[in-house]
């Protein structure tokens, strides 16, 4: 493909993408293909000779789109959204054009410097404490990771190394030091709650450290409190275990619960000031989805962000709810030296005078992979195209859609019961029943009828034995009428179930 052919192909691809978005609501939300559908449609080997773009492009509609579940569809109410927007897509286009493995500053200074700048912009927009700004008093800062799971794993690596550095006596050397580290590692525990996303458990699994969950219940609205944490820390101490990492969550996956940051913060200060405690506990805040709502100042205040200045790291996926397409998971640390100490492994081939001069950031030292993409560009485009006011307007609109949905559910108390929310555009609800078992049977049936209809996509969860439906209203294309139609469908199926149509 030469540049003339590229221009024609790109124009025609952009036309097709615009048409896709303009008509997305006419497509079924969830793909209906059978497993293995694509192998039947494609040759068993790559073509020997190159093909014309027009032939390749045709296969997008004919072969690929049938196997796509449309996350940007207005009737996509499942999981959390996977954001995108036109400025973000343009950012990806430029990023692909300027492709490089920009792991050191010198590999493309703009890639590194723009990342530091936009992550500071974002930190200010979210009202994060100054300790997370690159210019803040504690030498903190942000770095873009591929996913929240990667961000949690990266933070846990830094926490593990920090804990070992602070608790293994510096007088030990050689084998004695290695033995002491091995012994300590066998006692180190990562903590999370029963509502924390599974990525913390996975990070502990990858790092080979113990993992303990603190049960949270409806009594605390599925949030972690200082007193639950204190009890968990005491129980670890009684078992001679060393908690070194905790994930606190702003917006849990099941219900969007927000852990009680002020009381966790004061529990922590008591714990770390106790001379019998075996080292400080790194607290990571996972705000993968709901962190986006911090663009709204009232949510910043109600979330008690100042207390989070005592925590060590924070992550937010712009690719969930901030109009930036996958992948853009922003990880902030209070002191970047923790990441750099844990993740710097030098090799002669990567040394250069800019790095050894010490005035530049080399983001390879803040992450697991070496190479990295130019992801800051799409964030820059989004922040500039929408502006803070545009982002606030979008987040507010989707929260209001959630409130509208919840008020419709409240109006049909004869059919439904809200279990949690509306919180951050998520309402978790169930059908009523004479007993919990009957309610569960009805809700499962409602869920399967909605799924079978192909008209929208929602996901389910189980809260203290209650089967429940999660309805999320934060996809960019969703409007009020979509939410009303969704509710009407729930009512139609629920009335059908009560009318005896089960089975
Ligand atoms: N944390 C929370 C609260 C989530 O809801 C999710 C996924 O929805 C994750 C982490 C994992 O996100 P990722 O796919 O970016 O690893």
Image (cartoon, rainbow, N blue to C red):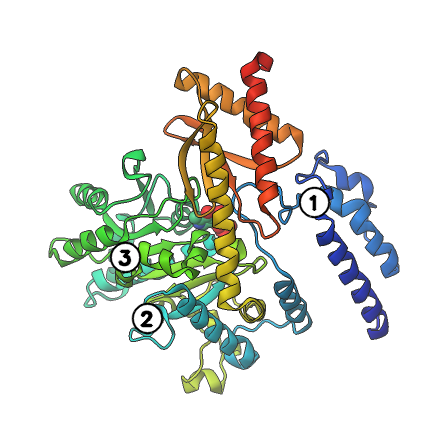
Q: Quadrant of residue 279?
A: bottom left
Residue 25: mark: 1
- 331 left or right of 85? left
Q: CA distance from mark 1 to mark 3?
A: 57 Å
Front tag of 1 and 3: 1
Is residue 453 in view? yes
Q: Earlier in the sequence, mark 1 or mark 3?
A: 1
Q: CA distance from mark 2 to mark 3?
A: 34 Å
Residue 130: mark: 2
Q: CA distance from mark 2 to mark 1?
A: 42 Å
Name the residue at 52% across, 69% down: 387
Residue 462 position within the rendered picture, expressed as x and y whole percent measured from the top left:
43, 30
Residue farthest to the front, as pictured? 411
Is residue 461 in view? no
Q: Secondary structure at mark 2?
A: helix
Residue annotated with mark 3 = 181
Front tag of 2 and 1: 1
Disc 2, disc 1: CB below 8 Å?
no
Name the residue at 31% across, 69% down: 131
Name the residue at 40% across, 19% down: 436
**155 in relation to 198, above or below:** below
Q: Quadrant of residue 307?
A: bottom left
Q: Secondary structure at mark 3?
A: helix
- Of residues 191 and 314, which is closer to you in this image? 314
- Of residues 42 and 83, which is closer to you in this image? 83
Label 3 within 8 A of ligand 1 by Cβ: no
């Amino acid at each position: 493909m030469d540049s003339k052919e590229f221009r024609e192909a790109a124009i025609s691809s952009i036309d097709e993408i615009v048409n896709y978005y303009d008509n997305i609501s006419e497509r079924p939300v969830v793909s209906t293909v059978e497993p293995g559908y694509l192998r039947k449609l494609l040759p068993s080997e790559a073509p020997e000779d190159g093909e014309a773009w027009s032939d390749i492009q045709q296969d997008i509609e004919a072969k690929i789109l049938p196997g796509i579940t449309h996350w940007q569809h207005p009737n996509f109410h499942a999981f959390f959204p996977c954001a995108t927007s036109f400025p973000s897509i343009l950012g990806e286009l430029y990023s692909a054009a300027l492709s490089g493995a920009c792991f050191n500053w010198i590999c493309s200074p703009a890639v590194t410097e723009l990342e530091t700048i936009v992550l500071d912009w974002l930190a200010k927009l979210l009202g994060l404490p100054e300790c997370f700004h690159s210019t803040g008093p504690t030498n903190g800062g942000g770095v873009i990771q591929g996913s929240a799971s990667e961000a949690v794993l990266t933070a846990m690596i830094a926490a593990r190394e920090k804990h070992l550095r602070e608790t293994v006596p510096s007088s030990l050397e050689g084998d004695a030091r290695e033995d002491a580290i091995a012994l300590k590692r066998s006692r180190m525990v990562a903590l999370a709650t029963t509502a924390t996303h599974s990525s913390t458990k996975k990070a502990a699994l990858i790092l080979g450290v113990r993992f303990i969950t603190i049960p949270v219940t409806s009594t605390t609205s599925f949030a972690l409190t200082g007193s639950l944490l204190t009890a968990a820390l005491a129980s670890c101490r009684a078992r001679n275990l060393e908690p070194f990492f905790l994930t606190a969550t702003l917006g849990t996956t099941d219900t969007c619960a927000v852990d009680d940051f002020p009381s966790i913060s004061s529990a922590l200060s008591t714990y770390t000031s106790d001379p019998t405690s075996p080292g400080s506990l790194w607290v990571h805040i996972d705000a993968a989805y709901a962190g986006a709502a911090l663009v709204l100042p009232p949510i910043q205040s109600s979330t008690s962000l100042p207390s989070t200045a005592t925590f060590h790291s924070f992550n937010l996926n712009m690719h969930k709810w901030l109009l930036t397409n996958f992948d853009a998971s922003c990880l902030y640390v209070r002191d970047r030296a923790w990441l750099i100490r844990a993740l710097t492994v030098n090799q002669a081939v990567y040394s250069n005078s800019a790095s050894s001069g010490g005035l530049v950031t080399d983001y390879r030292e803040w992450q697991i992979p070496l190479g990295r993409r130019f992801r800051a560009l799409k964030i820059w485009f989004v922040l500039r195209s929408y502006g803070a006011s545009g982002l606030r307007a979008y987040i507010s609109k989707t929260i209001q859609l959630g409130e509208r949905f919840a008020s419709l559910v409240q109006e049909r108390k004869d059919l439904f019961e809200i279990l949690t929310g509306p919180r951050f555009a998520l309402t978790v609800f169930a059908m009523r029943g004479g007993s919990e078992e009957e309610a569960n049977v009805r809700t499962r049936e409602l869920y399967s009828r909605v799924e079978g209809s192909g008209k929208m996509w929602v996901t389910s969860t189980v809260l203290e034995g209650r089967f429940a439906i999660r309805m999320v209203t934060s996809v960019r294309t969703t409007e009020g009428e979509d939410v009303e139609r969704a509710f009407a469908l729930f009512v139609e199926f629920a009335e059908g179930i009560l009318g005896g149509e089960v089975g």
